[in-house]
Amino acid sequence: MGSSKKIFSGVFWSVITNIVNALYGFIMIPILISHFGKAEYGLIGLAQSVNAYMRLMDLGLTSTNVRFFSNWLAEGDNTKVKKLFSTCTAFYGCIGLINALVLICVLVFSDAIFNVTPEQDIILKKLFGILALSALISWFTSCYTQIIQATENVAWTQKRLLITKVLMVLVLIITILLDLSIPIYYFLTVLCNWLILPWVVRKVREVAPMVSFIPHFDKSVFKEILPYTINLFLFSIFQFSYNNLQPVFLGMRNTVETVSDYKVVMGIVGVCSSITSVFLNAMLPSSSKAIANKDQRAYDMIAYKGTKYIMIFLGFCVFGMITIDRDLLTLYVGDSFLYLIPCLNLILIALLSRHMNAIASLILGGTDLKPIVRMTAFSAISALLVSWFLIPMYGMLAVAFSVICFELLQGLFYYFYYFPRIMNIRSGYIFISIFIPVTLAGIICYAIVSWIPSTTSLYLNVLFKGSSFALIYLMIMFFYVNKEDRTFLFRMLKRQ
């Protein structure tokens, strides 16, 4: 299977997985808020946010490993692949132990760190204990998935994640039927992630039989990847902080209830946001391979075709959700949360800038990350300052202003400097021929569907307005893409 077919297959199954994730979140969040209570459910979001920040200890190795595994496999250098796999297994094992110890420290002093009641603190301590155990296992096995993805088997990993999600749905059902506590529910949910490990290990043996699962740190190979991973880490630390400090700031500068507001909004926004990461992760192995082989044709296809397909899909999700926002949010968590609609729509519109993720995969597949590190640092710090100072006054709306600030600064930098001067990519063509037409199509579809009268049934509103938007949007996109694009997409869909 060629790289373009593997990219499409990876994207296709990643989108399916993310749709299932979105449906799971759509069902899970309101059910758990109703079952446990808004404040108590907010404890899960708070614990996850604190632990999510520990992912910075990855030091950027996730994308670094995929890049170097891809390059060395393309070059046939199995010795370096073997050394890197053993080195990262040893490194991740140490990081997992450190992560667990940090979470235990937070567990001990949680009552002094967070604004929670004594009863809530007891639950929070148990959640941190579960996360500490999870950290040991998830860190140690991180490298397994990375080498599978490096062989352009993204679709395989996504299919296995679907199994995990099915198990999580069963846990949710059992939790409601047996009235399980928050800690037991969370432990069973975490357990679902570990059950696919035997399949993962077997797949690693299949695609990379030369590697050893015994940890062994090799200084020479680590020294070779270190310059790249340091730059990527500096880039990631600001991007990661921007993404994960928002709910922490809400918990510190406002109330636990606003953390639940954040989880509700991001549960919907996450559908669009995850799609952008889907394209990035699926394209990174092929982008690294194209750069390693100096394949200009593949490079241009990813830059322009990839951006077009991402923008079409992103426009569909963003404007489709804005079209049904009120009915969707009411079905999701009830009409008492309708005050979140402005926050939801502002963040959705800001996410249109993520159409650049196809080109981002080419950036990560290269070596010069210093300019984007500096710009990401500036954007993230500026956006977090907006959150910090505005959250006491505006709550969740401050997060929306922060997202707009970050995405706008990033977009201006890439379009006016990095794309044309560093990557020799025609940013004007992308904006005029891709971004503008798809955005206008989304606005037109929204305007047409908004004239459709609502019924008394929320389900019918979502179904009818959503399907009407989809039909009109797809008709416009059919005439927007050329014959070559249509032939390729139909052939790939038939194959999947």
Image (cartoon, rainbow, N blue to C red):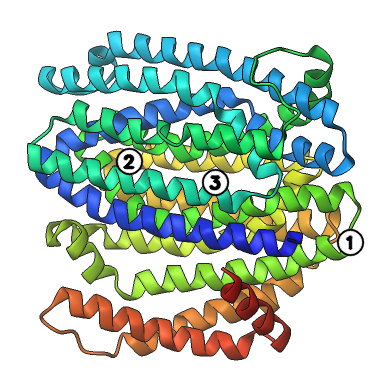
Between circles 1 and 2, the one closer to the viewer is 1
Tell me the quarter of the image containing the C terminus.
Answer: bottom right
> Which secondary structure lies at badge 1?
helix
**Residue at point 33% right, 52% down?**
267
Between circles 3 and 1, the one closer to the viewer is 3
Q: In the figure, 429 relative to 148: above or below?
A: below
Q: CA distance from mark 1 to mark 2?
A: 46 Å
The residue carrying mark 3 is: 157
Amino acid type at image mark 3: Thr
x, y percent for residue 133: 38, 18
Near-viewer residue (313 or 24): 24
Tell me the quarter of the image containing the N terminus.
Answer: bottom right
The residue carrying mark 1 is: 296
x, y percent for residue 269: 39, 56
Near-viewer residue (16 or 230): 16
Q: CA distance from mark 3 to mark 1?
A: 28 Å
Q: Residues within 10 Å of mark 3 (few under 14, many from 20)?
A: many
Near-viewer residue (142 or 123): 142
The residue carrying mark 2 is: 391
Residue 329 appearing in the image: yes
Residue 394 appearing in the image: no
Q: CA distance from mark 2 to mark 3?
A: 38 Å
**Earlier-in-chain disc, 2 versus 3:** 3
Q: Residues within 10 Å of mark 2 (few under 14, many from 20)?
A: many
**Residue at point 65% right, 31% down?**
60
Q: Are marks 1 and 2 in contact (CB under 8 Å)?
A: no
* Residue 115 falls in image quadrant: top left
x, y percent for residue 388: 39, 36
* Residue 132 falls in image quadrant: top left
Amino acid type at image mark 2: Ile
**Earlier-in-chain disc, 1 versus 2:** 1
Q: In the figure, 127 relative to 41: above or below?
A: above
